[in-house]
Image (spheres, rainbow, N blue to C red):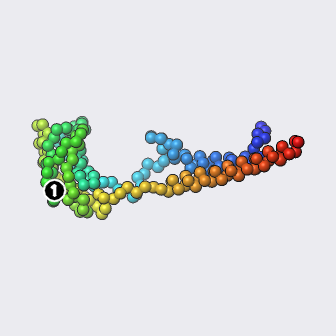
Amino acid sequence: MTRPSFIPTCAAPCIAAILVALFSLFAPVIAHEGHDHAASERPADVRLAPRFEVRSEDLEIVGVLADRDLLIYVDRASDNVPIQGAQIEVEGPGIKGVAAAMADGVYQLPAAALTQPGKYPLMLTIQAGEIVDLLAATLEVGEGAAAAPAEKNTERSWWLLAAISLVLVCGGLVARRLRRQAKERAIHHV
């Protein structure tokens, strides 16, 4: 197979190396949901919002401290269907009140007192139709967990910028060489 006349002999390996490098940089970006082909381990520094989980015969309750609010998710234990229209009263150190219904079995209660680090024993009284439960839970808030902002991973974007810059520089050099060779051929043909 012959090489096209517009690609100089030394440029073909350079172009191939650049394409391989670009593909290796963009391979993780090309992956989509369910096909990321990466290790499924959770990074060690992942910080989840403080939460608690309790379960009774009838109910499954998950509480998540989001900013200064306590979000409470209520599901039926038998089939995991969200329970709507429940009345949830929460009592604990610095907090006492009835959670307001949001949507699909999610309830919200202002909980500014729970944002400081520590362990908070909570009592939940739930009334949903014929179901009445009194459940105890412990919310553990770590250092800076409730107010920790999500840190952006800027490492990949830095490498992406460097790769694009490298491609542009190499492309400019190849284009310059191609133009010079085309001028030389034009001079020799005249």
Residue 104 location (% of width, % of height): 24, 38
Report the number of discs: 1
Pick the front one: 52 or 110? 110
Does 67 appear above or below 127? Answer: below
Q: Residue sitting at 78 percent across and 41 percent down? A: 5
Left or right of 82? Residue 14 is: right
Q: Residue sitting at 63 percent across and 47 percent down? A: 20
Quadrant containing the N terminus in the rendered view:
top right
Left or right of 130? Residue 157 is: right
Residue 163 location (% of width, % of height): 59, 52
Left or right of 125? Residue 70 is: right
Query: What residue would you read off at disc 1?
Result: 95
Callout 1: helix, strand or loop?
A: strand
Instruction: Classify 10 Å Cα crowding around label 1: few (below 14), some (14-19), many (20 and above).
Output: some
Whether residue 74 is visible, yes or no, is no
Residue 93 location (% of width, % of height): 15, 59
Residue 81 location (% of width, % of height): 24, 36
Q: Residue sitting at 43 percent across and 55 percent down? A: 152
Q: Residue sitting at 20 percent across and 38 percent down? A: 83
Whether residue 177 is visible, yes or no, is yes
Does 126 appear above or below 169? Answer: above
Pick the front one: 110 or 119? 110
Left or right of 131? Residue 154 is: right
Quadrant containing the C terminus in the rendered view:
top right
Amino acid, disc 1: Ile
Pick the front one: 69 or 3? 69
